[in-house]
Image (cartoon, rainbow, N blue to C red):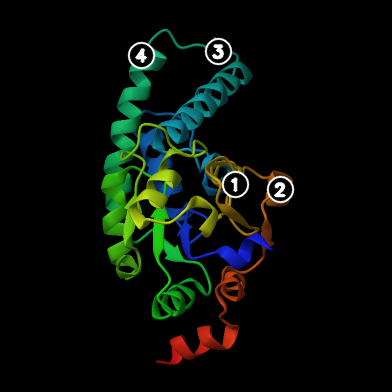
Amino acid sequence: MDKSEMIRGVAFDLDGTLVDSAPGLAHAVDMALYALELPQPGEARVITWIGNGADVLMERALSWARQERATLRAAAGKPRIDEADIPQEEQARVLRKLFDRYYAESVEGGSTLFPDVEATLAALHANGTPMALVTNKPTPFVAPLLASLNIARYFSVVIGGDDVQNKKPHPEPLLMVAKNLDLAPSSLLFVGDSRNDILAAQAAGFVSVGLTYGYNYGEAIALSKPDHVFDRFSDIMPIFGLSHSDNQETENE
């Protein structure tokens, strides 16, 4: 039997899967670095760092910015390291606090739903499909973002990065979904855009879908060997016995 024939519920990643959050995240990263007089990477580079939570995002941003600043200083004939710089560990703590402040200001306006997301969620919800959300994003940012995009009502379980000891790619948050939904992991689909999502799904025993349009560190999602690779979010619908016309009907209601 095809594993997809056993599917009874679905969990989704957030950033890069449901939501294009890169503009808001990049703005917060750039503003935090600017406040410390460090180079700003811009959205195209920040996209390659998204997926492991805010701590790792800012570690990557700070490492890049310090290296970039050292390179610029050397090119200008100055010592690569400025004696006035605060230690990197302290700089990292300050940077994370700045990021949280700037991201809280932009989390709603800096994020939009990817095409087909709202209509597909609505069709699945109308079909009675249990749905959950699993993200490495810090938990305090999750509920305001879902509310601002008007999709909070679709999820009976929401797990943020602060709700577990081990974030994706660890299976813990997905196994928590299975427990909360009272469904076997093998009867659940996990839909994501990055290798962390696919690794978590595989470790938890979920059927996995990899979407090609998200933030996967610049590599093809197919390399992570998900059970399904889809180009469009609505391509998950046939797994639940729904057609694209069901999606269209929901949009028109």
Mark 3, mark 2: which one is toward the viewer? 2
> What residue is pinned by disc 2?
225
Q: Residues within 10 Å of mark 3 (few under 14, many from 20)?
A: some
| Residues under numbered marks 1 and 2 in contact, where contact means CB atoms less than 8 Å apart | yes
Question: Which numbered disc flags the more N-terminal residue, 1 or 4?
Answer: 4
Q: Position of residue 153 (x, y in %)?
A: 30, 69
Q: Amino acid at mark 2?
A: Lys
Front-lying residue, 161 or 90: 161
On screen, residue 54 above or below 178? above
Q: Residues within 10 Å of mark 4 (few under 14, many from 20)?
A: few
Question: Which numbered disc flags the more N-terminal residue, 1 or 2?
Answer: 1
| Residues under numbered marks 4 and 3 in contact, where contact means CB atoms less than 8 Å apart | no
Mark 4, mark 3: which one is toward the viewer? 4
- The answer for how far apart the CA atoms under marks 1 and 2 are is 8 Å
> What residue is pinned by disc 1?
198
Q: Amino acid at mark 4?
A: Ile
Front-lying residue, 169 or 90: 169
